[in-house]
Amino acid sequence: MGETKKQRREQAREHARANREQTKRRQRRNRWFLQGGIGAGILTAAGVTLLIVSSVNAPAPAGTAPANTTAGAISFHGEDGALTPTVDHPTTTVAPPAEKPAKVDLYIDWSCPVCKQFETATSADLQTLVASEQATLAVHPVAILDRSYLGSRFSSRAANAAACVADHSPSSFLDVQQQMYDNQPEEGTRGLTTSRILELVHAGGATGAALDSCIRDETYRGWVEKYTAKGLTDKALVNPASGGFGTPTALINGKRWNGGRDFIRSIEDAD
């Protein structure tokens, strides 16, 4: 007899717990490295290389999408009790043999304080549901809060960084997202510099000259603008209370979650 849904969930929860502990240890090491003199020296050396790379790179055309994304999102599914980016065929979801997972879409802005609160409240349980193949997750990065950061375009630069991580290091995406939320600046400031964004991306486990160049050059600025505009005009994403689009916005099987009941329970009970 196959494992029950409850047994899969318990196993996935334990696996997810172990993964989170491992990630925390790695992030502590990365933070120590980046804050130390050795890390600063390497970043300085990397800056010279990046200047050379940037001189030959240009932002991608507006219609160009980051690798490992589809319809403005990077997707994740469960595999062997772990949460895995769907990188080879982003439009394909991996379902358990006997049941179809709930499809969860999250529209987020890494500069959004309410997104940070939502992440803190739901991410561990949501990732467990995905790891245990009860749900799939598609994260849609958008930029709607540039107005809150004194002309620095922090919201847009953060969303571009999300696209670059999806393109170059999809397995690090959720760890980088956690770093960005943990170090989120207050609204009404100038936000984070691009150099600071790079530090947090590295601390989340995403590295490489091509990735750094993508972030510095805002390679996917056009992609961010395209899908932000789409979010702002998509009637399915409108919050009835405000009459507009905001972040976070969650869809469960294509239907907007209205916040009226527990988010995780809503996913578990989805048809």
Image (cartoon, rainbow, N blue to C red):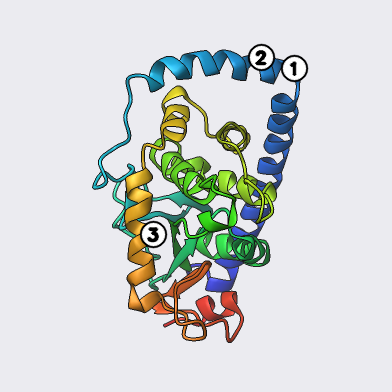
Q: CA–CA distance between discs 1 and 2? A: 6 Å
Q: Are marks 1 and 2 in contact (CB under 8 Å)?
A: yes
Badge 2 marks a residue whose secondary structure is helix
Badge 2 density bin: few <14, some 14–19, many ≥20, Cα 10 Å: few
Q: Which mark is residue 137?
A: none
**Residue 150 horizontal side relative to residue 232, left or right:** right
Q: Amino acid at mark 1?
A: Gly
Q: CA–CA distance between discs 3 and 1? A: 39 Å
Q: Residue 181, can we see it?
A: yes
Residue highlighted by disc 1 = 37
Where residue 154 appears, as percent x and y from the top left, is: 54, 47
Residue highlighted by disc 3 = 228
Q: Are marks 3 and 2 in contact (CB under 8 Å)?
A: no
- Is 232 drawn above or below residue 92 in the view shown? below
Which is more toward the observer, 41 or 13?
41
Badge 3 density bin: few <14, some 14–19, many ≥20, Cα 10 Å: many
Q: Amino acid at mark 2?
A: Gly
Q: Quadrant of residue 70?
A: bottom left
Residue highlighted by disc 2 = 41
| Residue for point 45% across, 37% down | 169
Q: Earlier in the sequence, mark 3 or mark 1?
A: 1
